[in-house]
Image (cartoon, grey):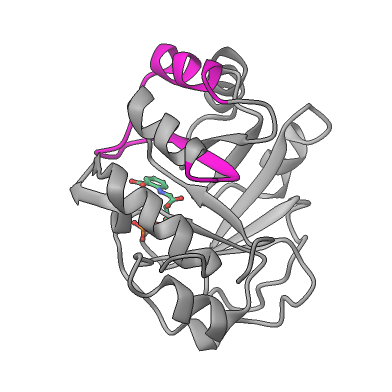
Amino acid sequence: MDHSLFVKICGLKTGHDVDVAVASGADAVGFVFSKSPRRIDVETAAKLCARVPEGVLTVGVFRNEALEDTRAWAQDSGVQAIQLHGSEDRAYFDALAGGSWTLLRAAAYDDPGLRFGDMGEDMLLLDAPVPGAGVAWDWSAVPALEGEKWLLAGGLTPANVRAAVEAARPWGVDVSSGVEQSRGVKDPALITAFIQAARGTRD
Ligand SMILES: O=C(O)c1ccccc1NCC(=O)[C@H](O)[C@H](O)COP(=O)(O)O
């Protein structure tokens, strides 16, 4: 069992799905603000953030948005963390640092020369090259990230997450497609199953 594994459920759109993720033990919930079947508007994100209890991190997910839009949407929705998935550079990260947000940097696992902290991030998310596509990769090909706060993502499901954790030994995991019944529509039973499987608490 791995009670300490950090688990983030991404791309939530409804209050019920947020409640299920929280009740099932998620450490973080993600809301997508950029182009995606999971995109929600700022008002919806604010309502979803308001029902998340203290201790569970609310994360806004962005990809190549204008800096001022990212800042405004994060502020207006009330997310506690900003996850950046595009070609945002160090200046972009620096402009958001020093605020109250935890910064997550998403990078493709095969990004050459990848090193934790290069963008000043607080957490690194190691993903497949296309985010949110449910595409798995060779999780044993993880760069040296031992001891860092890094999340494994990309094609994880309730069926494969435990093996992936054992192969890659991440600090945490992140999932979207693998807990959906159809693209962009979450399945509450899969959310619960994923969290239990990730931590090895499933029967
Ligand atoms: O989910 C999206 O559609 C998305 C769109 C734009 C930027 C990021 C996006 N998702 C980011 C995530 O955190 C996903 O959970 C992560 O890429 C893993 O996705 P999946 O392979 O579907 O589990």
Residue 116 in magenta stretch: no
Furthest-left residue in view? 182
Find out whether residue 40 is within the magenta segment.
Answer: yes
Residue at 71% in and 49% down: 90
Residue 191 at least partly seen: yes
Give the magenta part as a residue range. Answer: 24-52
Residue at the right extreme, as displayed? 98
Foreground: 115 or 142?
Answer: 142
Residue 91 percent across, percent down from the top left: 72, 42
Q: Position of residue 169 (x, y in %)?
A: 63, 78
Considering depth in this image, is 45 or 118 the residue closer to the camera?
45
The quarter of the picture where the N terminus appears is bottom right
**Can you give x and y, in whole percent of width and height, for residue 74 in the image?**
58, 23
As drawn, 75 above or below 180: above
Q: Is residue 39 above or below residue 172?
A: above
**Going 52% across and 73% down the picture, which residue do you hit?**
109
| Residue 178 found in image quarter | bottom left
As drawn, which residue projects farthest toward the front?
203
Residue 44 image position (x, y, % from top left)? 39, 16
On the picture, is 148 further left or further right than 44?
Answer: right
In the rendered image, the quadrant that contains the C terminus is bottom left
